[in-house]
Amino acid sequence: MTIDDGIEMRKKFHPLLLEVMKLKRKIKGDKLVVDGDFIENSPVLIVANHLTIDDIPTLAEAVEDHFYLLVSDEDEKTLNGKVLSANGVQWITRTCKESRIYSKEKAIEYLEKVNFAMYPEATWNLSPNLLMLPMNYGCVVIAKEANVKIRPVVTVFCEGKRYTKIGDTYDSADKSPIEAVAELRDLMSTMVYESFRKYYQDNRNLDNVYSTLVDGEEYLYEKRSEIDPYYWDNYVKQKYDAYPRAKADPEGVRFYESQFIFEPKTDDYAFFQIFNSSIRYDEDGNMLIKRISSENGGYSGTTCDSIDYTKFFGYGYNESNFRKVLEKKL
């Protein structure tokens, strides 16, 4: 079977899979709210944010058009993996350089015929402070080499609603990869922020939503003092509980996934990480690195003194690289 035959077969199968994805969302009781239309006359690279196991079906339902997808191969042999394969997937072994190179070449090949989607954050964004994790610039390199444009798409999950925003076409052709991915990340972060604003606008009558004016523009918000201090920990636990691999080994998955968070290769970034993270030591003298946060000591909330550090989730940094930086400096 040729690549054209495979694409055409999967295009015919795609509407059925789309209905299955819609049904699974409806069973959960979630409502999908889409802002923007996906209308393209030629293939584009879809670049999306990454938050949860529900990202892929939500993206597919919001876009509607058929696309192939770059996916890490940890779940290739699962039922979900087989469904994704039926729709069109390029599996990648994230820890293997040869696999990453091969997957890049295949993505460029597919983009000659069909839309292709990827998540350049490379892992779930579980940071309580970052709208988007640092993005690997491979996405803009692929778009440039395939001579296609990028369509950014973001989703945020808020209390039973999925707000998906489909952005305008982005052209990275005349920019360097580092410049382009920084610009694209800023664009997508703004889209995430706008999606949160939409949520608050839809829920402005709730008792915990407040309104004020900033430079003449209404700003809707919640008060930190009224948010359960365990809110984020419970939020992350719910995400892990919905994903069998993470539920079975949350600490192992947390540490494994941290290595895929992209880090700009600058001294300034390493400096920032050290002074915005919390470093503890257990009774045996082993270093315990915890999440980056804007809060004093590297934590948000008040849970850090009452839980087992080894079971706590870290967010927003590449833990393996961060350990190497610390060992050199301490």
Image: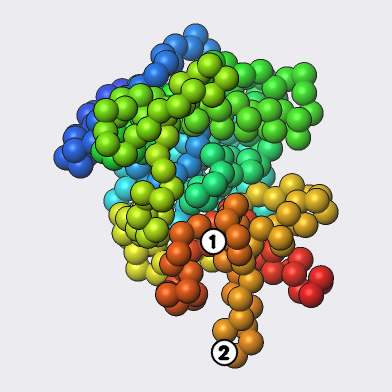
Residue 195 as seen in the image, left or right of residue 287: left
Image spot of residue 191 (x, y percent): 51, 26
Q: Which quadrant: the N terminus?
A: top left
Residue at left offset 36%, top offset 49%: 226
Specify the amino acid type for callout 2: Glu
**Looking at the image, which is closer to me, 86 or 29?**
29
Residue 201 makes an appearance in the image: yes
Disc number placed over residue 189 in the picture, else none: none
Discs 2/1, front: 1
Residue at left offset 54%, top offset 61%: 299
Q: Which quadrant: the C terminus?
A: bottom right
Residue positioned most to the top: 41
- Mark 2 packing: few (<14 Cα in 10 Å), some, or many (20+)? few
**Looking at the image, which is closer to me, 296 or 95?**
296
Specify the amino acid type for callout 1: Tyr
Residue positioned most to the left: 27
Check disc 2 and report its element: helix, strand or loop. Answer: loop
Q: Give the quarter of the image for residue 83.
A: top left
Residue at left offset 70%, top offset 22%: 172
Disc number placed over residue 299 in the picture, else none: 1
Residue at left offset 59%, top offset 90%: 284
Q: Give the quarter of the image for residue 188.
A: top right
Q: Which residue is mark 2?
A: 283
